[in-house]
Every structure is written in structure tokens, then in C-alpha cells.
Amino acid sequence: MREVSVVVLPGDGIGPEVTAVAIAAVDAAAAQHDLRVRWDEQLMGGCSIDVHGIALTDDVLATCRAADAVLLGAVGGPKWDTTDPDAPRPEQGLLGLRAGMGLFANLRPVKPPEALYDASPLRRERLAGTDLLVVRELTGGLYFGESAREGDSAYDTMRYSRDEIRRVALRGFEAARLRRGKLTSVDKANVLESSRLWREVVIATAAEYPDVELDHVLVDAMAMHLLSRPADFDVIVTENMFGDILSDEASMLSGSLGMLPSASLGEGGAGLYEPIHGSAPDIAGQGVANPLAAILSAAMMLRYSIDATGAAELLEDAVARALDAGARTRDLGGDLGTAEMAERVMAEITAS
């Protein structure tokens, strides 16, 4: 039996609740594919601030870098909200992980199950055929640029280098080549110089992929097109903040943030896997959080970092069958709690 090591960062709010379900699901699927996962739980986020005074310690970062993969729940909450620029914030842990692990590409697949078409605010005919992948640059742009306050003013700097743009563009082109052969690059090249460089580098990279169709869409137009004609898109590649906003918007195609997984990858080494939803402190501890995005994130982990495609497909199929059978948490218009939804998915795993 093959053994792998995964660091678990349950985090804050509903993070521990949904992560516990994902771990159980992985263990059940792995057992059917001669795989054993060694789980190593660590603190990151607000819970780490409470214990260590910072969101991510050097020891935890080193542990994550040495593992085969990292599974994250969620971080943040009102307890740690502050406008003090010198105060520790949970999100600093997430940014530190991305930078410290060299995770520059965030992959967010959006493929609404037909069983959930009615859970989306969009009409069924708009959703039909939607199967897209957002590839978001993760370690540059406004979130990592120089920022400061000067008297009554503040600034944040959006900065990108050619190398930063090219490496995430390559991820987008490679993904498109394995899918339907279409890449949409999203920028704001009519206003921002960083976006003009972005477009220039993406166009240059496209010459290496003659089998991939490339088009460019301004980010404000993309925000509209994503909801008006989502089935027209295959792979979408964009910078950090644009990708953050657009992928959260895309969650409405599946009816809920609780349905979308993500993978953060670098050139090699451990990847970071997490549901795109937040810590949802308003429902934490109530047992009503949707665990499906966490399970699907774990499936991405099995596929990309553990090389266990069979176990990944088992998890994905189990989620799909549970939904087809009518299982719904509150965010999807149903009444199942976290534990009840977990039971429905686990039943599908064991029945396979």
C-alpha cells in the first residue's frame, strides 16, 4: 500500500467542520485504491494568531513544504478583523503559504451539475453546457505589491514581471490543450500598464500553442459575459485580483460558494487545496455548512499531487450521485446538515 503525507490546516469558522468531512471521504476512497494518507494537522489563520501571535509560523510553512500536499479549510472571522496595518490578520497566513510554497497558479473548475441547475439564479438554458476552468495568477499583483499609508492617503501597487505572467499563461495554455483548446485571457489593457504587459506576454506565449485558440476580454466585460454566456468559455487566465473576483462570481453558476473547489500549484512540490468559500463565521458550529467543495478540493488533491486519479474520480462521482439522488444542504435549497450530507456522500463511496 502506497503512503503519502498531507498537512491539514483546518483554519477558522466552518473550516474544521468541512475539512473533517473531506478527510473521512479521502480515507474511504483511498482504502479502495491501495493508498494510505498520513494526516498532519497544523494551525494557520486566526487560530494560529491566538496561539502564536502570527497567522503562519516558520515551522508550519516548513512542514507544508515538506509534505506531498496541503489541505486547507478556511481562514478569517470578525474576531481578527482590524484596520490596523500592523496587526496580524488571518489572510496573511494564506498569502504567506502561497509565496512560501511558490504557488503561483490557482485552478478553479466550474462545471455545474445538471442536478443543481435550479439552485443557480441563472436560467437553465444559460447554464447548459458550462464547463470552464479559471486559472488565476496567485503571487503577484495588488495583493503582493508595495502598499502603505501616507497621512490621509493610501496606495497599493499592481506589479507584474514577464516571467510571472508567462508561467501562469503556460499553465492556462497547457490546461486548454488538454480540454477544448480555447483560452480567454482577461485583463484591463485599455487602462492599466500592467495589463498591457500581461496581454503582450500572453500573445507571445500563444505562438507556442498553435492548437489553442486565444482571445482577450476586458475584465468588466468578462464579469458580464460570465453570467450571460458561461458555456462559451473553456479556460480563463487572469491576474490575481481579477481572478479572485471572477471565480467568486462564477460560484453562482453552481448555485453556491459551497460547491467550488480549488488547487494552488507551483513548478513542483506540494500543492495547496481548498474550497473557495470563506470561513462563514455566521454559521460556524451550527452543523449546516456545505462540505462538498472541501470534498471536491480533496479530489483535486488526489489527482494533481497524489497521482491517485481513481480515488479522485471516486470522490467526484460520489458527490455527483448524492446530488442526483436529491441530497441538498441549506445553501442549495435543501435541509441537510453537514453530517447528513457527509453520510450521503460516504454511502455513495462505499457503494462503489
Image (cartoon, helix red, strand yellow):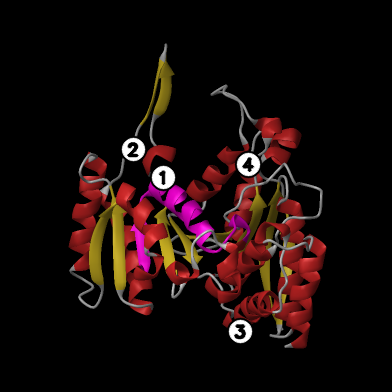
Determine which residue is flagged by label 3: 310
Q: Which numbered tag is attached to residue 56?
A: 4
The numbered disc on residue 284 is none
Label 1, label 4: how many angstroms apart (C-alpha)?
Answer: 22 Å
Which residue in the protein does label 1 denote? 241
Q: Which residues are magenta?
A: 233-258
What amino acid does circle 2 point to?
A: Met
Mark 4 or 3: in front is 3
**From mark 2 to mark 3, how far is it between C-alphas?**
41 Å
- How far is disc 1 from disc 3 in space, using C-alphas? 34 Å
Labels 1 and 3 touching (C-beta < 8 A):
no
Q: Earlier in the sequence, mark 1 or mark 4?
A: 4
Marks 4/3: CA–CA distance: 33 Å
Label 4: how many residues lie within 10 Å, few (<14), some (14-19) or many (20+)? Answer: many
Q: Is residue 246 left or right of residue 81?
A: left
At a point 60% along the width and 74% down the height, the residue shown is 115
Residue type marked 1: Met
Q: Which mark is residue 158?
A: 2
Query: Is tag 4's residue or tag 2's residue first in the polypeptide sequence?
Result: 4
- Is 323 displayed left or right of 267 in the figure? right
- Choose the circle earlier in sequence order: 2 or 3: 2
Identity of the residue drawn at 61% across and 84% down: 310
Tell me the mark number nearer the camera, choosing from 1 and 4: 1
> Which of 249 and 196 lies nearest the eye of the viewer?
249
Residue 257, located in which quarter of the rendered image? bottom right
* Magenta stretch: dominant secondary structure: helix
Question: Outermost residue, bottom direction?
Answer: 352
Q: Could you give the CA–CA distance between mark 2 and mark 1, rounded to whole angstroms? A: 10 Å
Q: Look at label 4 and name its amino acid.
A: Leu
Quarter of the image that includes the N terminus? bottom right
Instruction: Look at 42% across and 58% down and name the residue there.
Output: 227
